[in-house]
Image: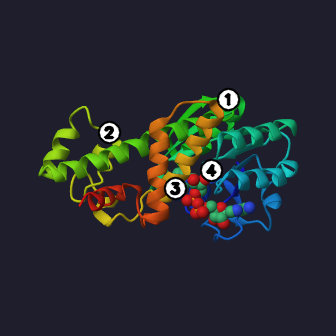
Amino acid sequence: MKIGFIGLGNMGGPMAANLAAAGHDVTGFDTAAPMPVGVTAADSAEAAVTEVDVVVTMLPNGQILRDVAASIIPAMKQGAVLCDCSTVDVDSAKAVADQARLAGLAALDAPVSGGIGGAQAGTLTFMVGGPDDAFAKVVPLLDIMGQKTVHCGDSGAGQSAKICNNMILGVTMIATCEAFALADKLGLDRQKMFDVVSTSSGSSWSVNTYCPAPGVGPKSPADNNYTPGFAAELMLKDLNLSQQAADSANADTPMGALARQLYHSFVEDEDGRGRDFSAMLPRFTQRNT
Ligand code: NAD
């Protein structure tokens, strides 16, 4: 397939490289990042998308996606699909899909879970919103970049699934960190705490797979001095998006709101920026002493 790829940063770079390595003809554009191996450089976003079957975007936020979409949609050929893999607000995903539809194109929102490691290894999970025929066309590409794809529904459903998942993740990570800090205070050995919780009703991905306590459980960023991994500021971005969505849908999300507030303080006032989101554990242990 001929593919245009826009946004070749930490995530987009290895995703585009994997598509090229699988034999697809990939043309890329980024305002700053270098071209990945096997990807042909275009001079502009518009030049990267003319004559391609599928355009993949992997951009920082909803406003940049809207700007890029406005410039590339008129340059795309009829029948082409715009597949946005960025994490953006639900309203931007829907607006871009509407704009594509008006131009006779199809658009998918297809955000990912799995991080930079998953992008490099081709093991991402994709959650997708948009029409069936566009999904069918793009799914072979998602199968190269990832190991699991769920078609969640209409436009916006992929972003909705992503932010709901990450709201659970942010809340459970904070609960896990405060519980480990409490266990410390109670004199409980961290390994014993893990052995019980990971096989009991308090278990979760945050405990079992990504334990925030160094030297306990499978290897995680805690074992690497909390180098991300998944940076606290990216978790804050996703919690901002889930609260924005909750406001616009009039949904009651008090735990999500509190998680957002705690990650905001952590990133802005408590040296959390650039640290893994599980570094909430030393934050709680330090505050409690
Ligand atoms: P990044 O900042 O490394 O990459 C974004 C790229 O977009 C940069 O290279 C930047 O130069 C480029 N860009 C910005 N404006 C542009 C424009 N107008 N035209 C062309 N290129 C432009 O970010 P990332 O970590 O690759 O994340 C990308 C998206 O994936 C974000 O929406 C993020 O929330 C999401 N995401 C990231 C992770 C992660 O672990 N990094 C995990 C899941 C989802």
- Distance in Å between CA atoms under marks 3 and 2: 20 Å
Q: Pointer 2: what residue?
A: 204
Q: Crowding at label 3, few (<14), some or many (≥20) Cα neighbours within 10 Å?
A: some
Give how far across and how far down residue 259 sits, in percent: 45, 46
Q: Is residue 120 left or right of residue 12?
A: left
Element marked by disc 1: loop
First reached walking from the N terminus: tag 3 or tag 4: 4
Residue in the foreground of this view, choosing between 5 and 203: 203
Image point 61% across, 66% down: which residue? 36
Q: Amino acid at mark 3?
A: Leu
Which mark is in front, 3 or 4? Answer: 3
Decide if ligand 1 comes within 8 Å of the CB at mark 4. Answer: yes
First reached walking from the N terminus: tag 1 or tag 4: 4
Q: Can residue 262 be seen?
A: yes
Q: Is residue 222 left or right of residue 158?
A: left
What mark, if any, has residue 154 been given in the picture?
1
Q: Quadrant of residue 226?
A: bottom left
Q: Pointer 4: what residue?
A: 86
The quarter of the image that holds ligand 1 is bottom right
